[in-house]
Image: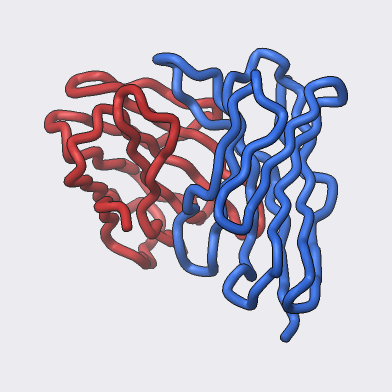
Chain colours: A red, B blue
Amino acid sequence: EADIYQTPRYLVIGTGKKITLECSQTMGHDKMYWYQQDPGMELHLIHYSYGVNSTEKGDLSSESTVSRIRTEHFPLTLESARPSHTSQYLCASSPRTGREAFFGQGTRLTVV
Amino acid sequence: GESVGLHLPTLSVQEGDNSIINCAYSNSASDYFIWYKQESGKGPQFIIDIRSNMDKRQGQRVTVLLNKTVKHLSLQIAATQPGDSAVYFCAENMGGSNYKLTFGKGTLLTVNP
């Protein structure tokens, strides 16, 4: 069982609110990722980080932002939530030389 | 653009039968191909991977086959069990320091008792 945690698991929030989705891993992994997944669909990479103070945008454009101040922590922030942001957000991590990515349980976000 | 996709969106099998889940890819430069299993309400879990210079790899009850000629990947599950019911994704990455997984659409596997 991978040690990567996401909070909250479920979040319902009103339009225009600022939200931060938390992701923490205790494995000391250098690389961390955020994926967005709609029900029954594939995962789309929206942000990734190769280490502290390193963040890059992924393949799918997203209005969210991320930060990587500590190795174990990779929060995702939406400054002003909109209904189009409703989706599941999955955080993952992998070691520097590893091929396998370990995923958290996900945060299911609903913006009303 | 480059993409990874699956042939069948759903697959229903009887318990004890063998399951085969297929995947087509288009990026010839991918170094690794990986199968993930995602159960309802959970994040994807690694099942098995295969490097591009291999054509077959076996794990516990699972076998992955890679056909680079036709850019096709398959996951075979032997003696399928109800606990195998999940969505299965294939994914590819370029390897090296550029570790970014590109996922295809999933296949929902349902195992009937």
Residue at the limit of the structure toward the bottom, as seen here: B113
Percent of width and height locating residue B36: 56, 49
Query: In the figure, A101 relative to B26: above or below?
Result: below
Using the rendered view, name the quadrant where residue A49 is placed: top left
Percent of width and height locating residue B39: 54, 65
User: Is residue A44 shown left or right of residue B19?
Assistant: left
Q: Nearer the viewer, residue B107 or B60?
A: B60
Query: In the figure, A86 relative to B50: above or below?
Result: below
Viewer can see residue B11: yes
Query: In the figure, B81 relative to A24: above or below?
Result: below
Using the rendered view, name the quadrant where residue B50 is placed: top right
Query: In the figure, A89 relative to B29: above or below?
Result: below
Q: Residue at x 58, y 19 (%)?
A: B31
**Total numbered labels placed on residues in the image:** 0
User: Is residue B112 shown left or right of residue A14?
Assistant: right
Q: Nearer the viewer, residue A24 or A84?
A: A24
Using the rendered view, name the quadrant where residue B91 is placed: top right
Q: Residue at x 71, y 21 (%)?
A: B2
Percent of width and height locating residue A80: 35, 45
Where is the N terminus of chain A found, in terms of image quarters? bottom left
Q: Residue at x 79, y 46 (%)?
A: B22
Q: Residue at x 38, y 45 (%)?
A: A102
User: Is residue B90 shown left or right of residue A23?
Assistant: right
Percent of width and height locating residue B94: 55, 18
